[in-house]
Image (tube, rainbow, N blue to C red):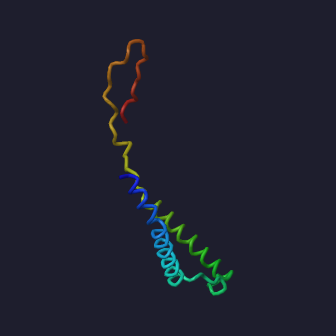
Amino acid sequence: MTHFVHEFYMSNLPAMRDAYEQAMNEYMESQRLLNPPIDETQMDVETEHEKKHREAMERKKKQEMDDKKEADIHFEDMDHEMQEPAATAAPAPGAPAVEEPPPK
């Protein structure tokens, strides 16, 4: 049975190869028609003035983005004067006692 399958495959191999090559040729031709090669002489060439203007606009946009990032930073408000000192615990044995200044 395997010998028959092998012989059948080998007999159909040239036909499959021809069909593959024909399909690839049709595909390549369709791609050539749809996407012609680019002629670099017809492309718009950026002048020195346009290049400087574009770079200036890119720098300006980058600066605006950096400024926006800085503006989005929010700091928490802390009123250090209003914070109450931590509850006084008994000092550890052998540790010097900490004296608090008298209230004003």
Q: Nearer the viewer, residue 12 or 36?
A: 12
Q: Residue at x 44, y 66 (%)?
A: 12
Q: Residue at x 54, y 67 (%)?
A: 63
Residue 38, horizontal then vertical, whole percent: 60, 82
Q: Nearer the viewer, residue 82 or 43?
A: 43
- Eyeballing the image, is 95 above or below 72? above
Seen as rendered, the residue at the extreme right is 48
Q: Nearer the viewer, residue 37 or 77?
A: 37
The quarter holding residue 85 reads top left
Residue 23, horizontal then vertical, whole percent: 47, 75
The quarter holding residue 100 reads top left
The quarter holding residue 52 reads bottom right
Q: Residue at x 59, y 81 (%)?
A: 37
Q: Tell how many labels.
A: 0
Q: Nearer the viewer, residue 6 or 84?
A: 6
Residue 103, horizontal then vertical, whole percent: 36, 33
Instruction: Name the image quarter holding the C terminus.
Output: top left
